[in-house]
Amino acid sequence: MTSHDSVLDKDGVRLTVDDAVATVTLTNPAKRNAQSPALWRALTEAGRALPGSVRVVVLRGEGKSFSAGLDRQAFTPEGFDGEPSFLDMARGPQDELDATIAAYQEAFTWWRRNDLVSIAAVQGHAIGAGFQLALACDLRIAADDVQFAMRETSLGLVPDLTGTHPLVNLVGYARALEICATGRFVHADEAERTGLANLVVPADQLDAAAQDLAAALLAAPRDAVVETKALLAGAASRTYEEQRSAERAAQGRRLRDLAGISD
């Protein structure tokens, strides 16, 4: 995408805005866009900084990898400069540890806001936290060289950055358990077949495919997309009759709006 106005550029995250489309780029290709608490804070800040005009957010990573996951420096005794190491956090009070993880999770939660549609454009490695960041988005376009993997369990940990819920919703419990417990790679063909990826394209066409999808999403009226997203997002937790009722209520709002009738 072109002609972006830069809104934020810090700690490995750049947010640019071009009218109704925002692009969040991970900007540390030398480290395969490895993640850190500072990067998570920057992602949270990016979500808060989005102008109200934005309808679609594209998430991408510079270089050959989308994100190789958590920077292993987090598990060294020294950790990151100015940050407590994960080992020190583990030795602290449980409520403080819980609050710290909750703050980290905020970087992964805003992508599914009802007023936005988010697209992850994923190439190369999307491992651990990188996989979970891709899963945080509504839609995923994958390059044909993509390698998804959930390695946390292999390291004695669990996926804790909001990735388990969308993973189970997309591929089902049994496959999600197998992917997480084995830590194996999920390649492009399987990702597309199982619903992890909406579309797979050659790597050199990834940005163009994300741009095309963003344009297609902008073609429908914003309020209709917002209402439809909310209906679909809530469908799994509603009964059939509850969903019918939600559809009627949403359609009533749309018809009144089209007729120029205010509530």
Image (cartoon, grey):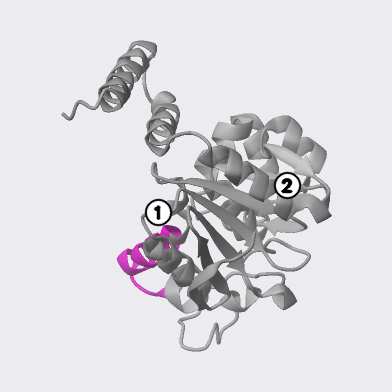
Check the image and report above or below for 40 versus 117.
below
Part of the protein shown in magenta = 91-106
Q: Residue at x 16, y 29 (%)?
A: 263
Quadrant in the rendering for residue 96: bottom left
Q: Which residue is mark 2?
A: 142
Residue 55: image location, x then y, percent: 45, 48
Location of the N terminus by quadrant is bottom right
Check the image and report above or below for 115 versus 80.
above
Indicate the secondary structure of the residue bearing disc 2.
strand
**Which one is nearer the viewer's eye here, 158 or 222?**
222
Label number found at residue 122:
none
Q: Is residue 184 left or right of residue 89?
A: right
Q: Are marks 1 and 2 in contact (CB under 8 Å)?
A: no
Indicate the secondary structure of the residue bearing disc 1.
loop
Q: Is residue 94 magenta?
A: yes
Residue 15: image location, x then y, percent: 52, 67
Residue 19: image location, x then y, percent: 48, 57
Q: Residue at x 42, y 64 (%)?
A: 44
- Identify the residue at the far front of this view: 260
Can the viewer see residue 188? yes
Q: Is residue 189 left or right of residue 105?
A: right
**Which one is nearer the viewer's eye here, 14 or 156?**
14
Q: Is residue 106 left or right of residue 131?
A: left
User: Which amino acid lies under the numbered mark 1 shown in the image of this protein?
Assistant: Ser
Can the viewer see residue 146? no
Sequence-wise first label, 1 or 2: 1
Residue 106: image location, x then y, percent: 41, 59
Q: Is residue 258 magenta?
A: no
**Which one is nearer the viewer's eye here, 82 or 13?**
13
Quadrant in the rendering for residue 190: top right
Between marks 1 and 2 in the image, the one whose residue lies nearer the viewer: 1
Q: Which residue is mark 1?
A: 53
